[in-house]
Image (cartoon, rainbow, N blue to C red):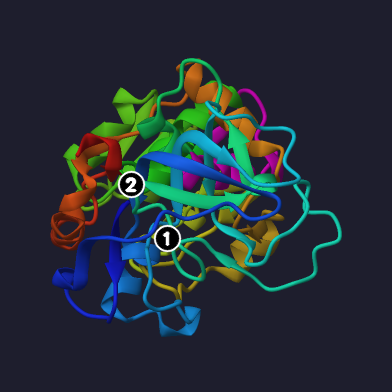
Amino acid sequence: MKAVVIHEFGPPDVLTYETVPDPVPRFGEVRVRVHAATVNRVLDVAVRAGTQAHRKPMMPLIPGVDCAGVIDAIGEGVTRFKVGDAVAAAGGMPLEPCAEDGAGYDGPQGMMGIKRPGGFAELVCVPAFKTHHLPVGLDFHEAAVVMRHCPTAWNLLVNIAGTKPGEWVLIMGASGNLGMVGIQIAKNICGARVICAAGSRARADVGLALGAEHAIDYTTQDIHAEIMRITDGAGVDVLYDNIANPAVLPQAFKAIGDGGRLVTAGAHGGPVVPIDFFHLYDKRITIRGMPGSKPSDLPLCFQAAADGRIKVRIAHVLPLSRAADAHRMMESDPGMGKIVLDPSAG
């Protein structure tokens, strides 16, 4: 098969497109013929550059921390999948063979594309219990992006914040991947009223197209004053922030109202941010940091995307042979939206 392989850390040119042996599914595994794998700023680009040494990537490495495609082979002990099933897989998983439901496994674990071969290949083997059926109506490119970002946003807004219909939700980073998904989940799943914010008018207005009622450009507008005006002085019920911009977040925090909640799973713009502790205790605000999601969230995300209630932003779909170009594009414009590699495209 063809695959992208990293033999050493460095610039995008270290991504080599080469022929490697077809993988064979072990006990409890399925083999996926890949139709989509997303390019991620940290887990792919930074790992390749060598700035994520603490993750101890397996070298030589086939990167790609997610994939979507069709099962074309099944290992011993797998009964709940069949050849031809449309599936997706991502993230941390067992490194050794295990039962198809994962029961009793206590061996080493790690992320595909970091500790075990990933999705930047025509074929990849993954444990059955970390593989998920795709609903009818959801294509592979969308499924790979949904799997990467939607469960995190769903967990923060639905499970952690407990967002209720009619509540005001402020979404920071309106044009980012987590921001765009968050806007749609807050509005279309939770029934909330959404205010979005970003660092330019064009980026803020992306949120309006996704269903936000108000958009704030915090480079030209006072974010605290605007929120208080919009909410008639009550403030927002939920602040969803995965950036931790120290120049903006303190003012947004002061716009949280009584009993409000701040939820987060990211801090790439910080991470150290000063907050007003008087406002924290006076308004009885809860702050919850919670990466990841519940296993039951992913099927709900897939179905919401298949139904059109969540739409992902895909900037480019490229053949696998252009993985190095995809990394260059991501480095030059991190906010462009997702880049998807499609090995079936040649």
Element type where label 2 sits in the image: loop
Above-or-below relation of 247 to 236: below
| Dot placed on the residue nearer the N-terminal end, 2 or 1 | 2
Q: Residues within 10 Å of mark 1 (few under 14, many from 20)?
A: many
Q: Position of residue 53 (x, y in %)?
A: 41, 84
- Can you give x and y, in whole percent of width and height, for residue 103 in the image? 84, 54
Q: Nearer the viewer, residue 144 or 229?
A: 144
Q: To which quarter of the image does residue 179 belong? A: top left
What residue is rendered at 26% in x and 76% in y?
49
Magenta part mainly helix, strand or loop?
helix
Instruction: Give the residue at mark 1.
Output: 249
Q: Amino acid at mark 2?
A: Gly
Q: Is residue 220 above or below residue 342?
A: below
| Segment colored magenta | 147-168
Screen quadrant of the C terminus = top left
Q: Is residue 297 visible?
A: yes
Query: x and y percent of residue 203 in the render?
Result: 23, 41
Residue under label 2: 176
